[in-house]
Image (cartoon, rainbow, N blue to C red):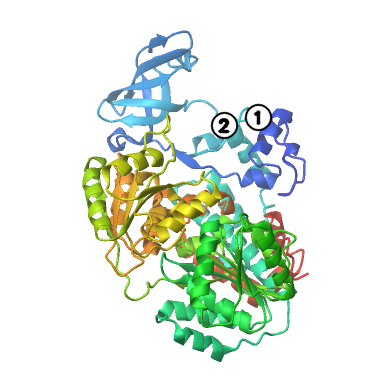
Amino acid sequence: MEGQIASHQEWSLDTPVTVLKGLGSHKAKAMERLGIRTLGDLLYHFPFRHNWREVQPIQHAPHGEIVTLRGQITGRPLSRWYGQKKSRHAVTCIVDHVPIQLVWFNRNYLLDKLRPGVWVHATGKWDGHRLQLTMEELSFPDDVRREQEFLPYQPVYATVSPLTNKGLQKMIWDLLEQMKGKIDEVLPPQIREKYRLVSREEAIRAIHFPADKEALRQARRRLAYEEALFYQLGLQLRRKQIANSFQRPPRKIPHPEVERFIQKLPFTLTADQRKAVDEILADLERPQPMNRLLLGDVGSGKTVVAATAMLAMVKAGYQCALMAPTEILAEQHSKTLQELFREERVSIGVLTGSTPTRQRQELLAQLRMGLLDILVGTHTLIQEEIQFRQLGLVVTDEQHRFGVKQRESLRNKGVYPDALFMTATPIPRTLAITMYGDMDLSVIRQLPAGRRPVRTQWIRPKQFPQVVAWIQQQVDQGFQAYVICPLIEESEKIDVQNAVDLHAQLSGQLKARVALLHGRMPVKEKEQVMEAFYCGKVDVLVSTSVVEVGVNVPRATVMVIYDAERFGLAQLHQLRGRVGRGSAQAYCFLVADPKSAIGKERMKTVVQMQDGFAIAEQDLRLRGPGDVLGVRQSGEVDFRLVDLVHDQVMIEYARRDARWIVEESPGLLQEKTSPLYQELVRRGYGEAKPFD
């Protein structure tokens, strides 16, 4: 039998899984591929679903669902063979006085077992119209079987060969029997009582083999909260470690000078911008380094908030670095800062991979001597040869596009500098506090006064000629347009419009200057195209999503996104945000023909919503956390039970509880023997150990 348990052993959750009898080297390697190395890992290898096997009366069996029926075989099976290995079998079975057909594929060994007069419990998909059950599982009630095989909810696990689902069921059942009374509680009593959570041992047993739906619900509730709490504890410990380990002399920010700068701006800061500025300035004066995420919708004015922070640091005698993901965006930031600081004595330099060698050497010399106040650049800023005289603030734009090591490398160029991370990708609060729980959060939801909403329309590809005519009208009035495609060149695998073909098509149809931009072009050529579009020398820019974060073009009033169903909601919203930067009304056309209901729902969402945060919430519901940021980052939030869409309240409470433990009840983590601390270490979150 698979996984026989040697009952005389005394085990803990940290005991290697290889102590299980009969595991063998092949199955042990398969276990390791599933991430199962200890008995605790095996118990925490939760089923991804349960098959409900409680016998139902046939009149209550829902059509199209998985059900379990009890009946008696009345005839001989009929078989159809497809070649030597494939077959379809059917046999008549009387269930509650109703004759039905049991159908199964292959598994020829059942032919001899399903004889007339035999009683069976058959589980499978029920077709109430044809009175047919397509069997997934079969058992014989008269057999002497293991207790867990007759529980109504049967767990279904992720497996790899040679492991089987039944083999894992048996191993986990036997292990739970052996570990009775040996699974220690890890949550503080006050938290368990506060939320009325079942015990850890009861939850682990019920998540695998629940007696009923309520037992399964309570088990998942307990274990999901536990998962969220330990994740948040890890983040809060890291936050505490930074606060305790990096102390520096308090900084004196010249608030009157900063306030004069704000008052001289050609616009008034929104309430959200002002609040963010105040939060950041307060952070800059603390002895602990700032670690803050500035979260704002497209066009909400994050750059001016960051600029105010950089000015404050320069006036206090420090240098600043601003790192952007692309050269185009770095150049744009440089121009924006020069415009904002035109009446201030602030020196600004730009350093990218294409900066000429002589100019680069001059910039680096100025930086070392402290003659350069702000250095704007791409990831080239993290190179070893780049040395600041006194780096005080690091600003990272579109921070999720950089790796953790890249962000930390730049920060290490100063003595505990402050860090401000910005993103124009609206992130749902749940996702933000989950992924960035070790950061303070400033959110800008309001758009600057005078910005009109972009009128958005979803059209089918056959209506595209009407859009081309509209682009011509806008160009004739002196405005500009973007046309975005998902691909650069024609693909045999994917039938979608491509930038090269569309550029050729529009060049022939429009009386306008049409240019092409995509990520494979040389950097210099991309810069020349964007510069030409920015200066008004190009009327229509056909591009891939490389313009998602790019140059502000106030005269651009039309955004056309071809094959829009191939983009994420948050990405569509960001692309739409490229237009409407001036005073004229802007328009966005989504050219798409989605076939699925979800695809159609996504198009309607962008048309109806202008709030990037609301769109991001919908994106989270439809696509999951990995794609909300435009790139797969699910590895950063690898939960087994926590659902970021439906468990938002739970995550909020787990975050509060983690802060309470770390800030107000550190005694719960102080002793290395405490169950909470031991579990934190077991989950890989206890490396900081700030209380030892």
Q: Residue at x 69, y 81 (%)?
A: 287
Q: Quadrant of residue 280?
A: bottom right
Judged left or right of residue 294, residue 73 is left
Residue 518 in percent (x, y) is at 46, 46
Q: Which mark is residue 166?
A: 2
- Indicate which disc, 1 or 2, sits on the residue closer to the N terminus: 1
> Residue at the top extreme?
84
Determine which residue is flagged by label 1.
Answer: 2
Residue 170 in percent (x, y) is at 61, 35
Q: Residue at x 34, y 43 (%)?
A: 563
Residue 400 in percent (x, y) is at 55, 58
Amino acid at dot 1:
Glu
Residue 65 in percent (x, y) is at 35, 36
Any part of residue 626 in sight? yes
Judged left or right of residue 76, residue 376 is right
Binning the other alpha carbons within 10 Å of mark 1 as few (below 14), some (14 to 19) or many (20 upward) gives some
Q: Residue at x 39, y 17 (%)?
A: 117
- Would you say the residues marked 1 and 2 are in contact, meaning their CB atoms lie under 8 Å apart? yes
Binning the other alpha carbons within 10 Å of mark 2 as few (below 14), some (14 to 19) or many (20 upward) gives some
